[in-house]
């Protein structure tokens, strides 16, 4: 359905450092520079950061979240720790299991340096 997701960055290099760390924890390589943008490519799609092309300040969406797939709870924890160590901050509840109609999920939420809310999500397999 999606070709890519891109978020604005006030300080492109601070955001690159943050996303290199959190996405690196999920096994995604460093961002590839293209003018005032960095692209992170994976088999499931592309994530990018950019300075806004209209010259206005970068802002974040209220109520918006970008979710990244994690292979395990440990990988989600590594994502969270890398983000906190590289200019991000924890938000929502601490990383852990949440239960809902779709089953059990392991979630780890962060705010990036510009306030965008991101999440590492691991779907816990149903037990027979």
Image: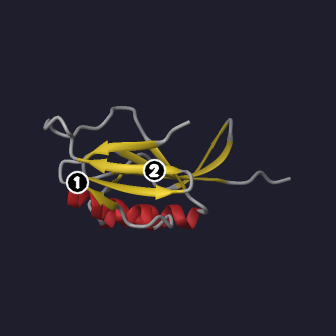
The residue under label 1 is 35
Contact (CB < 8 A) between labels 1 and 2? Answer: no
**Residue placed most toward the observer, 63 or 48:** 48
Mark 1: few/some/many CA within 10 Å (<14, 14-19, 20+): few
Residue 126 is left or right of residue 32, and the answer is right
Closer to us: 97 or 53: 53
Please name the residue shown 43% across and 61% down the image: 23
Task: Indicate how the structure is coloured in the image.
Answer: secondary structure
Say whether disc 1 or disc 2 marks the residue closer to the N-terminus.
Answer: 1
Image disc number at residue 96: none
Q: Position of residue 14 (x, y in %)?
A: 22, 60
Element class at badge 1: loop
> Does residue 104 lie above or below 59 as drawn?
below
Residue at the location (51% across, 49% down)? 45
**Residue beneath the point at 45% across and 54% down:** 94
Question: Going by the image, does 93 lie left or right of 58?
Answer: right
* Numbered badge on residue 46: 2
Q: CA distance from mark 1 to mark 2?
A: 17 Å
Q: Position of residue 10 (x, y in %)?
A: 18, 48
Residue depicted at x 51% and y 61%: 76
| Among the 4 quarters of the image, the one containing residue 6 | top left
User: Where does residue 44 sit, x and y in percent of width and height?
Assistant: 56, 51
Nearer-the-camera pick, 102 or 58? 58
In the image, farthest residue toward the top: 62
Q: As drawn, is 54 to the left or to the right of 45?
A: left
């Amino acid at each position: 359905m999606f070709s890519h997701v891109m978020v604005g960055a006030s300080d492109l290099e601070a955001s690159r450092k943050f996303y290199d760390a959190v996405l690196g924890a999920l096994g995604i390589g460093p961002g590839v520079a293209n003018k005032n943008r960095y692209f992170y490519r994976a088999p499931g799609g592309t994530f990018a950061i950019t300075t806004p092309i209209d010259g206005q300040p970068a802002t974040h969406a209220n109520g918006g979240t970008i979710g990244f797939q994690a292979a395990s709870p440990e990988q989600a924890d590594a994502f969270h720790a890398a983000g906190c160590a590289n200019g991000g901050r924890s938000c929502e509840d601490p990383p852990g299991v949440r239960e809902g109609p779709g089953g059990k999920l392991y979630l780890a939420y962060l705010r990036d340096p510009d306030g965008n809310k991101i999440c590492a999500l691991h779907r816990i397999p149903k037990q027979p």
